[in-house]
Image: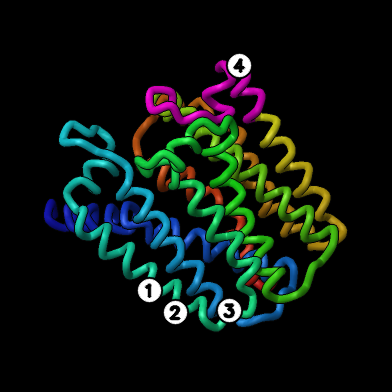
């Protein structure tokens, strides 16, 4: 029995810390955007591109994240013991992203925006003067990540489909942005002291605790407002799927502050980004 538990735990850790789980989140969110906006293009190719690009970027990011022998983080400890696996996953992701980018090459300009935003998130970890300077940008870390997730899963599919849907795309983009931003605030709030020590500036390190809380709940409120503005464009049950993760996010701040486990952050909080997509898919299967 213990061996089964150990194998199950090891497999779960692999899915979570290899970034396969977060890559699935990105694909699920992209699927929901396609469904809500009715976008027509080669979905499978773009899903594969998003999946492999996420594997590539996250393993690159985590490879650059220091984690000494004394690391108490479950993820850093896992990464420390598997540096070669991280490089292999980075290369696999890079090869896959390039392969599936090729059919999308005619959309090189909007795709380049996603690549640039992704690089800017990890660039401050590079120990070279031009990249160290990025640590000083007051809004950098959190907004780069929020922008890239919103852009890749919501805006870029519309560009590739060449179907800009006006207000429905605008409201969905704003909803996604503020929900993801609220979740990113929780991560940055956890890493607040470490970021200050490393000289990485963001709104979270700039504001005091009360200011961070106001920013967080204001972002959650805006995510709910923009979900509601989609009412004329999507069915009521779809609005409900958007509001469920907003409600959960609104209630999770105190819990996240008292439970610093990487399982809470990289499984539960990251999973909140795709929760709406999972609920949407369940409704789709049910024929709603």
119 to 233, vertically: above or below: above
Whether tag 1 and tag 3 are in contact, CB under 8 A, the answer is no
Name the N-terminal-most of marks 1 and 4. 1
Q: Locate residue 7, reporting x and y percent.
A: 18, 58
Q: Is residue 208 above or below residue 22?
A: above
Let me know if residue 201 is in the magenta part: yes
Question: How far is the residue under mark 2 from the one under mark 3?
Answer: 10 Å
Q: From the viewer's perspective, is 196 left or right of 85?
A: right
Give how far across and how far down residue 13 sits, in percent: 28, 52
Q: Give the magenta-colored segment's residue range.
A: 196-216
Tell me which numbered mark, 3 or 4, is placed earlier along the sequence: 3
Question: Are the residues flagged by discs 2 and 4 in contact, CB closer than 8 Å?
Answer: no
Image depth: mark 1 or mark 4 in front: 1
Residue 206 lies left or right of residue 256; in this view the side is right
Tell me the CA gap for discs 2 and 4: 47 Å
Viewer-side residue, 175 vs 9: 175
Tag 2 secondary structure: helix
Disc 4: which residue: 210
Is 234 a magenta residue?
no
For the C terminus, the image quarter is bottom right
**Label 4 CA crowd tier, 10 Å (few <14, some 14–19, many 20+):** few
Query: Which label number is shown at residue 104?
Result: 3
């Amino acid at each position: 029995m213990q061996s089964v538990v150990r194998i199950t735990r090891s497999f779960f850790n692999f899915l979570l810390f290899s970034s396969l789980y977060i890559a699935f989140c990105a694909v699920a969110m992209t699927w929901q955007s396609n469904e809500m906006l009715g976008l027509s293009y080669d979905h499978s190719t773009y899903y594969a591109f998003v999946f492999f690009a996420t594997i590539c970027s996250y393993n690159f990011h985590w490879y650059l994240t220091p984690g000494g022998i004394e690391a108490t983080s479950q993820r850093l400890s896992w990464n420390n013991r598997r540096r070669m696996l991280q490089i292999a996953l980075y290369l696999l992701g890079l090869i896959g992203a390039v392969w599936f980018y090729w059919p999308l090459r005619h959309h090189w300009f909007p795709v380049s925006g996603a690549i640039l935003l992704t690089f800017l998130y990890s660039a401050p970890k590079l120990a070279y003067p031009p990249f160290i300077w990025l640590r000083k940008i007051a809004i950098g870390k959190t907004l780069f990540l929020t922008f890239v997730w919103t852009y890749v899963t919501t805006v870029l599919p519309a560009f590739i489909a060449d179907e800009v849907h006006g207000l429905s795309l605008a409201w969905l983009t704003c909803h996604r942005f503020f929900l993801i931003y609220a979740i990113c605030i929780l991560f940055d709030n956890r890493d607040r002291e470490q970021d200050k020590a490393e000289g990485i500036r963001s709104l979270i390190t700039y504001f005091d605790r009360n200011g961070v809380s106001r920013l967080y709940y204001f972002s959650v409120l805006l995510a709910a407002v923009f979900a509601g503005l989609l009412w004329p464009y999507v069915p009521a049950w779809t609005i409900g799927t958007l509001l469920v993760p907003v409600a959960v996010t609104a209630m999770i701040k105190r819990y996240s502050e008292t439970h610093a486990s990487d399982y809470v952050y990289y499984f539960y909080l990251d999973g909140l980004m795709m929760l709406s997509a999972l609920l949407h898919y369940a409704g789709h299967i049910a024929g709603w």
